[in-house]
């Protein structure tokens, strides 16, 4: 059985812990080096806003909340975790084995499988500026436009790295365009050379 932790019951929580059966999953994810950890350390993101709508799974033991899902986020911080705006799903009658598998599922699906390659920062730069409205970008990283400089700082890379990626992708697109054009010319030439058939 799963239920939401009400605001009234949130106020009764005296301590928040990582569930003992989820410790290995928690320790694993915290040893990883996320691509944008540099931006988090430099406060280039609005962490307070990003943390506000977090979703956690856990169990209640007396007045303690033992969480086993939700900590896989890069911006998770147990010491400064605020429950007020977070959504807490409370599990009842759940075994330690079930807790452990749910913890690892969350780590793999929400973090590891969603990790972003540092080889495509130029595409991230283009897509973010094309897709995210200025009003939202101001709330998330304090700027209406994501500059190459800011993205480089967030990812702990240099502007030159992103410029090289952009040049590589532009060259690749140009080659593909030429290849298609040349293919069409070759097809036309072959059709002209082929014998007329009735």
Image (tube, grey):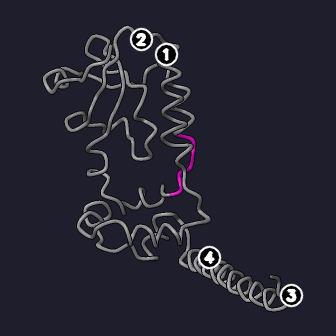
**Please, is residue 16 above or below residue 122 in the view?**
above
Q: Earlier in the sequence, mark 2 or mark 4?
A: 2
Q: Nearer the viewer, residue 123 or 150?
A: 123
Q: Which residues are magenta?
A: 30-35
Instruction: Label 1: state its secondary structure.
Output: helix
Q: Earlier in the sequence, mark 1 or mark 3?
A: 1
State how far apart marks 1 and 2 are (Cα). 6 Å
Is residue 101 found inside the magenta-colored segment of the image? Answer: no
Instruction: Label 2: state its secondary structure.
Output: loop
**Circle 1 sits on which residue?**
98
Is residue 32 found inside the magenta-colored segment of the image? Answer: yes
| Secondary structure mostly seen in the magenta stretch | loop
Residue 73: x and y in percent read 43, 42
**Circle 3 sits on which residue?**
195
Classify residue 169 by image quadrant: bottom right
Instruction: Label 4: state its secondary structure.
Output: helix
Residue 120: x and y in percent read 58, 66
Instruction: Look at 52% across and 20% down and name the residue there.
Output: 100
**Circle 4 sits on which residue?**
169
Question: Quick check: marks 1 and 2 in contact, CB under 8 Å?
Answer: yes
Left or right of 175 in this view: 186: right
The tag on residue 49 is: none
Question: Quick check: marks 4 and 1 in contact, CB under 8 Å?
Answer: no
**Please, is residue 79 above or below residue 6 in the view?**
below
**Circle 2 sits on which residue?**
94
Left or right of 190 in this view: 19: left
Number of the front mark, 3 or 2? 3
Instruction: Look at 30% across and 65% down and name the residue there.
Output: 137
């Amino acid at each position: 059985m799963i239920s939401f932790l009400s605001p009234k019951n949130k106020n009764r929580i005296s301590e928040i812990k990582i569930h003992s059966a989820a410790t290995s999953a928690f320790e694993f994810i915290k040893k990883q080096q996320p691509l944008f950890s540099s931006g988090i350390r430099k406060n280039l993101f609005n962490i307070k806003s990003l943390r506000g709508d977090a979703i956690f799974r856990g169990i209640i033991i007396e007045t303690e909340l033992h969480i086993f899902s939700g900590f896989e986020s890069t911006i998770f911080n147990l010491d400064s975790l605020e429950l007020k705006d977070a959504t807490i799903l409370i599990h009842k009658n759940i075994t330690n084995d079930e807790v452990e598998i749910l913890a690892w599922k969350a780590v793999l699906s929400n973090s590891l499988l969603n990790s972003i390659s540092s080889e495509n920062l130029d595409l991230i730069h283009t897509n973010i500026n094309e897709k995210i409205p200025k009003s939202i970008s101001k709330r998330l990283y304090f700027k209406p436009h994501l500059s190459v400089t800011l993205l480089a700082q967030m990812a702990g890379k240099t502007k030159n790295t992103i410029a090289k990626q952009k040049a590589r992708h532009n060259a690749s697109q140009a080659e593909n365009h030429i290849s298609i054009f040349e293919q069409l010319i070759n097809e036309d030439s072959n059709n002209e050379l082929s014998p007329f058939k009735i």
